[in-house]
Image (cartoon, rainbow, N blue to C red):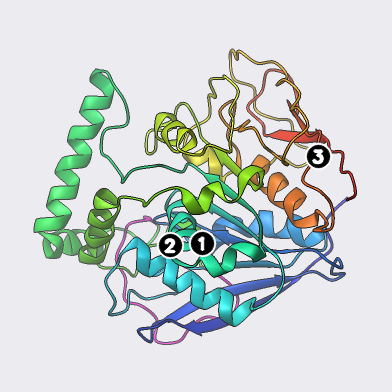
Amino acid sequence: MPNPPSATEVLSVPAADGTRLSVYRDTPVRPRPGGATVVLVHGASVTADLWRLHARHLTGLGLTVVRYDQRAHGHTPRGQAPLTIRQLADDLHQILCAVAPTGPLVLTGHSLGALVLQELAAQHPQLLPRIRGMVLLSATAHGASVLPGRGPRALLLAAGRSLFALTCTHAPQAVDRVRRLLPDTHRYTLTPRPSTRPDHGPSPCRHGVRHTPTAALADLWQCLRRYQPGDATALNQFGGRLLLMAGADDRHIPAARTRQLAERLTAARRPPGDPPPRHARAARPPPRAHQRPHRPPRRRAGPLPSSPPGPIISELPAFRAISLGAGIQSSAMLALSAPACSRRSTTQFSPTRAGNREPFTPISTGWSEK
């Protein structure tokens, strides 16, 4: 059954340095009383359109969704402020104050967006009582690295990335000249930013950085490379309200980086597992009911063990598989949970179909009233 249509409102929120942040609020036709506002934060080089189908799914559940183009992405210009993770977290704080000043929140971020959410929790602890849950996809405990793993293939990939990063950092104008020669259909082509801001929603993901000069992209890369998250005090306060997800074949943020973050969270536990999906699959929505799921040749799979009574999503099932479909299902579950309920759950996770790479979804949830 298709989800009922929702209204997407295009907003412009001023940041501290005056930069106009492009924000998109998806309002359901029939809002659910007591439901949290779900905030979706995209990763690098894409736009808020990454979450288009997921926003449709969440609004179909009666939830309000807020998504936006991060600084130097999509319809949001770079601005004058330094391009740092802390600045991106401050931008999100400004958006929350303007668009969702009250009420419960569920925050979901992928890759760069996961770093922004970690920094938001650390720099703005006054928001923690409002955050009903947080989902971090392809999160890391360290800054970005060009080395995706071990082995000859990883070393070759790291050498190519290093050469490209050095070229963008030390010769950005030369790279800009090359980007202007690329066809309009290329995702890294460079075109002038339109003088008027469109009112029909975010640009496609492939247009994420087509208006962003190479020098700004180099600044963002240096920011990601040098980023060092603070202590995990803020994340530990979430307890079982925090869900981490990673992919074993992720060549951008290896799953080992997410495991290192999980080890710093004393309130979280993870079962063993080896997930096959990659970094980009985190941005892929779950299949529709009439579509046949993709089947890889082989998969070591099996149902995850049942979670013992404890906080909701107290374990980290993401180390078995990653899909934004699973992340969105978790976001919806957190957003729909009543705050008056105790944090005891019997949630279990299981593959939607044996032998495929589709998302792990919660198949049973038991709440107990206080």
Q: Residues within 10 Å of mark 3 (few under 14, many from 20)?
A: few
Closer-to-camera residue (328/260): 260
Q: Residues within 10 Å of mark 1 (few under 14, many from 20)?
A: some
Q: Is residue 213 above or below residue 233?
A: below
Residue name at image x 53 percent, y 20 percent: 274
The image shows residue 293 at horizontal and vertical percentages of 70, 30
Residue 207: mark in rendering = 2
- Name the amino acid, label 1: Pro
The image quarter in which residue 34 lies: bottom right
- The mark nearer the N terminus, 1 or 3, is 1
The image quarter in which residue 57 lies: bottom right
The image shows residue 122 at horizontal and vertical percentages of 45, 59
- Name the amino acid, label 2: His
| Span shown in magenta | 186-202
Q: Which residue is mark 1?
A: 204
Residue name at image x 36 percent, y 69 percent: 87
Residue 210 shows in the view: no
Number of numbered callouts drawn = 3
Q: Secondary structure at mark 3?
A: loop
Residue, far front: 370
The image quarter in which residue 20 lies: bottom left
Mark 1 vs mark 2, CA separation in Å = 6 Å
Query: Contact (CB < 8 A) between labels 1 and 2?
Result: yes
